[in-house]
C-alpha cells in the first residue's frame, strides 16, 4: 500500500469515527444526563459529563411511574408481533417465489402498493374495526395492526428467489410437502434475511406511539413510548427523570440489537437480489 493510499485510508477512518461520535452523541448525552442533578442540565453552566453520578433520577422513575409494566407491555406486543409478522411475510414470500397461480403478479404488485399507504390514512377505519372486535385495551388490539408488512414480504421474496429452484423440484419429486419444505429447508437457508427483517420489525414496532396510544385507554395497558410521552408532559422541566426513563426504554432495543448483530451484515443486502 502506497503512502497516498494509507493517508486516504486514515482520513476516511477518521471521518467515520467523527460521524459515529456525532450520531451517537445524543444517546451518550442522554445517558450522562440521566445521572445529573437538575442544575447540571439546565443551569447557567450546563454539564456534558456528570460531576457526581447519582441514581436519584432512576429511583424516581421506578417510584413515580409504571415503567416496568409499560416496558413489559412493549416487550410482549413487540415480540409477538415481530414473530407473527415474520411468519406471515415468509409464507407470503414463499408463495410468490415458488408457486405459479393466476393473478400472481397482480397480487404481488398490490402487496408492494401497500408500502405507499401511510398508516395515518387508515387510522380511523382501523380503529373502528378493532374497536368493533372488542380489542381495545388488549394486547391483540395493538398486535393485529402490524402483522402484515408489504416491505417484509418484498425483501424475503427477493431472497427466496435466489435459492436454487432445483431444491424445490427435488423436494417435490421426493414427496416432500410444501409446508415441510418451507419449514425444514427454506427457513434454515434464509436466516440472514429473516434476522434482518426481525430486527427492522422489532425496532419499528417498539417505537410505535400513535396506535398504542389510541388503542389503550387504561394506564396499565400503555406501552413504554406512551408512558414516556406522558412523563414528558407531567414532569415539566425534570429532564433528568425523563432521560432516565428514556434510557430504561432503550435497553431492550440495545439488547436485541447486540444479540443479532452478527446477522445484520448478511441481512443488509438480502433484499438487493433481483429476479
Image (spheres, rainbow, N blue to C red):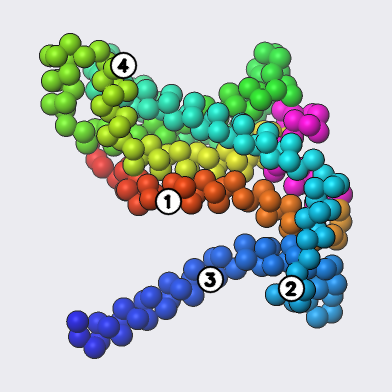
The residue that mark 3 highlights is 21
Res. 9 image quadrant: bottom left
Neighbour tally class for label 3: few under 14, some 14-19, many 20 plus, Cα within 10 Å: few
Distance CA(mark 3)–CA(mark 1): 19 Å
Local crowd size for mark 2, using a 10 Å CA cut-off: few (<14), some (14–19), many (≥20): some
Mark 3 and 4 residues: CB-CB less than 8 Å, in contact? no
What separation in Å lies between label 1 and label 2 (alpha carbons)?
Answer: 30 Å
Sequence-earlier tag: 2 or 4? 2
In the picture, measured across the screen, residue 40 lies left or right of residue 205, that is right
Which mark is nearer the camera, 3 or 1? Answer: 1
First of labels 1, 4 by sequence position: 4
Residue 75 seen in the current view: yes
Residue 126: horizontal and vertical position, in percent?
63, 23
Q: Earlier in the sequence, mark 3 or mark 4?
A: 3
Image quadrant where one finds the C terminus: top left
Relative depth, front residue between 205 and 77: 77
Q: Earlier in the sequence, mark 1 or mark 2?
A: 2
Q: Rounded to the nearest whole Å, what is the CA distance between mark 3 and mark 2? A: 19 Å
Q: Point out the stretch of residues depicted in magenta.
A: 214-234
Q: Secondary structure at mark 3?
A: helix
The residue pinned by badge 1 equals 261
Amino acid at each position: 500500500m502506497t503512502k497516498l493510499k494509507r493517508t486516504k485510508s486514515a482520513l476516511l477512518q477518521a471521518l467515520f469515527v467523527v460521524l459515529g461520535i456525532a450520531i451517537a452523541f445524543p444517546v451518550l448525552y442522554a445517558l450522562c444526563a440521566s445521572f445529573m442533578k437538575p442544575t447540571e442540565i439546565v443551569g447557567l453552566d450546563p454539564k456534558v459529563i456528570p460531576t457526581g453520578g447519582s441514581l436519584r433520577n432512576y429511583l424516581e422513575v421506578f417510584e413515580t411511574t409504571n415503567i416496568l409494566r409499560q416496558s413489559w407491555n412493549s416487550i410482549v406486543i413487540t415480540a409477538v408481533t415481530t414473530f407473527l409478522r415474520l411468519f406471515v411475510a415468509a409464507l407470503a414470500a414463499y408463495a410468490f417465489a415458488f408457486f405459479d397461480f393466476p393473478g400472481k403478479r397482480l397480487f404481488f404488485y398490490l402487496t408492494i402498493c401497500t408500502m405507499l399507504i401511510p398508516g395515518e390514512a387508515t387510522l380511523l377505519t382501523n380503529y373502528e374495526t378493532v374497536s368493533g372486535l372488542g380489542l381495545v385495551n388488549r394486547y391483540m388490539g395493538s398486535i393485529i395492526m402490524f402483522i402484515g408488512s408489504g416491505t417484509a414480504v418484498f425483501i424475503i421474496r427477493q431472497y427466496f428467489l435466489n435459492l436454487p429452484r432445483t431444491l424445490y423440484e427435488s423436494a417435490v419429486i421426493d414427496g416432500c410437502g410444501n409446508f415441510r419444505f418451507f419449514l425444514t429447508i427454506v427457513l434454515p437457508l434464509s436466516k440472514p434475511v429473516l434476522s434482518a427483517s426481525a430486527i427492522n420489525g422489532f425496532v419499528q414496532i417498539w417505537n410505535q406511539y400513535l396506535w398504542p396510544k389510541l388503542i389503550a385507554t387504561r394506564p396499565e395497558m400503555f406501552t413504554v413510548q406512551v408512558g414516556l410521552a406522558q412523563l414528558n408532559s407531567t414532569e415539566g422541566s425534570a429532564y433528568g427523570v425523563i432521560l432516565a426513563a428514556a434510557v430504561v426504554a432503550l435497553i431492550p432495543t440495545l439488547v436485541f440489537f447486540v444479540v443479532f448483530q452478527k446477522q445484520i451484515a448478511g441481512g443488509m443486502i438480502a433484499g438487493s437480489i433481483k429476479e
